[in-house]
Amino acid sequence: MTAPIGVLALQGDFREHRQTLAKIGVDSIEVRTLADLTASSGLIIPGGESTVMQKLALAYDLFQPIKDALKAGLPAFGTCAGLIMLADEILDGIAGQSGFGGLDVSVRRNAFGNQLDSFEVDLEFKGVVGSPVHAAFIRAPIVERVGPEVEVLSTLGDGRIVGVRQKNLMGISFHPEVTDETRIHELFVSMVGA
Ligand code: GLN
């Protein structure tokens, strides 16, 4: 039996991620302590609010341990706020905002502005075969810069980047966990198993 996948459960839609993992038959645990983190074979960082997630990670003494674990190679998958938490540079953050980092990208928060807070669209996604991925964007960030080691996995029709991977880290702007999409979680599970 392999170790379960951890879902960071400080804030945000961690339950939906656990439900998606359950649908594909993968065990998961909620991560709120160092012991939970250590017991996890990979880490999902959910959507929610990155500024609050940073504060809670610090308050729960998880901020530095997560940062270290990602650097040491723990596979991680961030959606929306989770992508922001994985980015090395956050644009339009609040004063003092920083994430765990590890992805050599610059991510702009709330990049779609107020007129277009939320929308859904079908996307091609590298590594996902078959029909396009149905993607829900909710106050979503956009990847504005990618470093040389970063692989772009998905873009909007106008070329803006919404999915990236660098070694053990994958981040996407949207929320497959709120639609019926399970294939990106399957991709992450294969990263964890590799
Ligand atoms: N706008 C949020 C943030 O800055 C992210 C929104 C989301 O995760 N759906 O963290």
Image (cartoon, rainbow, N blue to C red):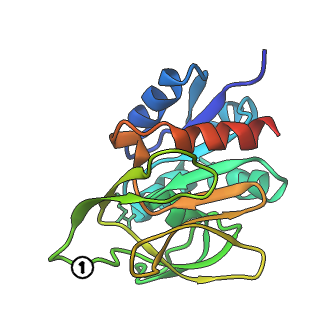
> How many numbered marks, from 0 up?
1
The spot of residue 89 in percent (x, y) is 59, 80
Q: In the rendered view of the protein, which quadrant contains the C terminus?
A: top right
The crowding category of the residue bearing disc 1, from other C-alpha atoms within 10 Å (few below 14, some 14 to 19, many at least 20), is few
Kind of residue at disc 1: Gly
Tell me the residue at 65%/32% (across/down). Answer: 5
Q: Which residue is mark 1?
A: 113
Which residue is at 53% across, 29% downward?
Answer: 21
Q: Please state which of residues 102 and 116 is positioned toward the viewer in this rendering.
A: 116
Q: Is residue 192 left or right of residue 174?
A: right
Where 5 sits versus 147, above or below?
above
Badge 1 marks a residue whose secondary structure is loop
Expressed as whole percent of the image width and height from the top left, the position of residue 117 reads 21, 68
Displayed-image quarter of ligand 1: bottom left
Residue reaching furthest to the left: 115
- Judge left or right: residue 28 versus residue 156: right
- The residue under the point 78% across, 60% down is 167
Residue 158: image location, x then y, percent: 39, 81
Q: Is mark 1 within 8 Å of ligand 1?
A: no
Residue found at x 62% / y 77%: 105
Residue 98 placement, left or right of 181? right
Q: Residue furthest top?
A: 1
Of 14 and 172, nearer the camera is: 172
Q: Report the quarter where the N terminus lies.
A: top right
Residue extending farthest to the front is 130
